[in-house]
Image (cartoon, grey):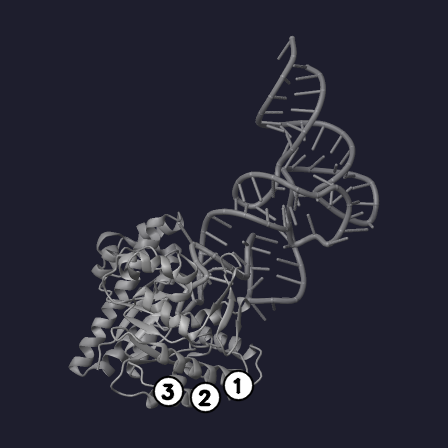
RNA sequence: GGAGGGGUGCCGGAGUGGACAAUCGGAGCAGACUGUAAAUCUGCCGCCUGAAGGCUACGUAGGUUCGAAUCCUACCCCCUCCA
């Protein structure tokens, strides 16, 4: 069973604001690139000519590239999905492009990533069961084509399970995708706005169908509390833009939960943002100084905050690993979650209300 | 001494008889962010209140009017120009 790992997002060939050296110091082992973004800019061939993504971004650790399936969802206005593939308009200049399962495999080969993903269709969370069903079927057919087209033996190809918030579709997709022989299996299409309980129940619908001897990758999950939940459900790999994005917006992870460094109470706080943390930021600067940098929109603020949040996550992963080895994971989980006070009840209910108010044809929540 | 311009909420700055507690910025305060079109977005922001509602407000003091930040009179202060 592999050690649980978190991959920071480096869509454009960079974990925003950090150098590879800093990532190493923080303890990051693998990063996530994005085929869609790198295809549009600078272009897959450009990166290939320059020696592949590792050399291009000066990162000698492993790289996992996402296929661009998520962008079909997040840039839906610019995309049109057919059985053949996706026709989309560039969000940069409006030019038209086409992505197919085969092209996506070729692109990722040219990028020379270590782990690559099949092209999947990731529908928005509030679409009808019929549409999600279509997406599940298409994702399966695309997975088949990706696998057929995948020749390189030194690149690991992962398949992706879809199914929205519908238990039967999750199961169906999991069975279908695992009928194909992939090195690892990902659970996609979650954490798109649905309530947490639903996210986890969908994970629980899926995992029983995944082979126990292959890594399981929960895509797009990356808050501290969610990583712990995921690990407790047998997930090995996580990625998310959350730790880094949230950092740039002033939200910092601490053992007592997420804290907004721009809050007035930090103006004069002489201690580091998280006294338990060993990151460069916490070793060197007071919360008051960080607060000031954020207020002034100084560029250093974003770097220091990103360093801290990523270090918080890598330390969390280390603690998780240790707890698993010692057989004390459940205790660790309970201790962590009780200390790391997640969103309060009021906020949770507001989120649920928001979710219930979303337009949909079939409501998966009873 | 004369001529002209101006004084609006924490700041800048609209408004120039009713739809104004007052556009819009900024600052301030709080919240969100999960396979990154994000150094982004949202809310609050005179006082009292959870809200309904009420109260006090546009330099000061009077006045005109059903009604004034907006019109009139006087005064105070600031800026520019001429002596």
- Which residue is identified by label 2? A169
* On screen, residue A126 above or below A19: below
**In the displayed structure, does residue A55 sit left or right of residue A197?**
left
Q: Residue at x 55, y 83 (%)?
A: A128
Q: Position of residue A219 (x, y in %)?
A: 37, 75
**In the displayed structure, does residue B75 sit left or right of residue B9?**
right
1 or 2: tag closer to the N-terminus: 1
Mark 2 Cα-neighbour bin, 10 Å: few <14, some 14–19, many ≥20: many
* Chain of the residue under label 3: A
* Quarter that holds the N terminus of chain A: bottom left
Q: Residue at x 51, y 89 (%)?
A: A366
Under tag 2, what secondary structure? Answer: helix
* On screen, residue A135 above or below A292: below
Q: Are marks 1 and 2 on the same chain?
A: yes
Q: Position of residue A279 (x, y in %)?
A: 23, 59
Q: Are marks 3 and 2 on the same chain?
A: yes
Report how many numbered discs are placed on residues in the image: 3
* On screen, residue A306 above or below B34: above
Q: Residue at x 51, y 56 (%)?
A: A93
- Which residue is identified by label 3? A206
Quadrant in the picture for residue A57 = bottom left
Disc 1, disc 2: CB below 8 Å?
A: yes
* On screen, residue A120 above or below B33: below
- Which residue is identified by label 1? A129
C-alpha distance separating marks 3 and 2 = 10 Å
Q: Position of residue B19 (x, y in %)?
A: 73, 54
1 or 3: tag closer to the N-terminus: 1
Q: Nearer the viewer, residue A327 or A5?
A: A5
C-alpha distance separating marks 1 and 2 = 8 Å
* Chain of the residue under label 2: A
């Amino acid at each position: 069973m592999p050690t649980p790992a978190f991959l920071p997002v480096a869509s454009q060939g960079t974990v925003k604001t950090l150098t590879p050296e800093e990532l190493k110091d923080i303890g990051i082992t693998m990063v996530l690139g994005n085929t869609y973004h790198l295809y549009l800019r600078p272009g897959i061939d450009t990166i290939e000519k320059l020696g592949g993504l590792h050399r291009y971004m000066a990162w000698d650790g492993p790289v996992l590239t996402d296929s661009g399936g998520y962008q079909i969802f997040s840039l839906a206005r610019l995309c049109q999905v057919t059985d053949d593939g996706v026709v989309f308009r560039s969000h940069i200049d409006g030019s038209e492009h086409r992505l197919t399962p085969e092209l996506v495999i070729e692109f990722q080969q040219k990028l020379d990533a270590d782990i690559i993903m099949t092209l999947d269709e990731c529908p928005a969370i509030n679409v009808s069961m019929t549409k999600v069903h279509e997406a599940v079927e298409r994702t399966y057919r695309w997975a088949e084509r990706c696998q057929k087209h995948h020749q390189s033996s030194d690149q690991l190809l992962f398949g992706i399970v879809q199914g929205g918030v519908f238990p039967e579709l999750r199961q169906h997709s999991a069975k279908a995708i695992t009928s194909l022989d992939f090195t690892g299996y990902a659970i996609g299409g979650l954490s798109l706005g649905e309530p947490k309980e639903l996210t986890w129940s969908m994970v629980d619908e899926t995992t029983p169908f995944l082979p126990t001897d292959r890594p399981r990758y929960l895509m797009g999950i990356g808050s501290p509390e969610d990583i712990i939940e995921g690990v407790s459900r047998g997930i090995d790999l996580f990625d998310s833009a959350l730790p880094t994005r949230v950092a740039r917006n002033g939200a910092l992870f601490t053992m007592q939960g997420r804290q907004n460094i721009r809050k007035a109470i930090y103006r004069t706080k002489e201690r580091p943002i998280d006294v338990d943390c060993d990151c460069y930021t916490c070793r060197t600067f007071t919360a008051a100084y960080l607060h000031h940098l954020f207020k002034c929109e100084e560029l250093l603020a974003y770097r220091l905050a990103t360093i801290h949040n990523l270090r918080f996550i890598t330390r969390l992963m280390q603690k998780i690993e240790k707890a698993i080895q010692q057989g004390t994971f459940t205790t660790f989980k309970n201790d962590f979650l009780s200390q790391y006070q997640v969103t309060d009840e009021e906020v949770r209910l507001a989120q649920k209300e928001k979710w219930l108010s979303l337009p949909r044809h079939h409501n998966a929540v009873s």
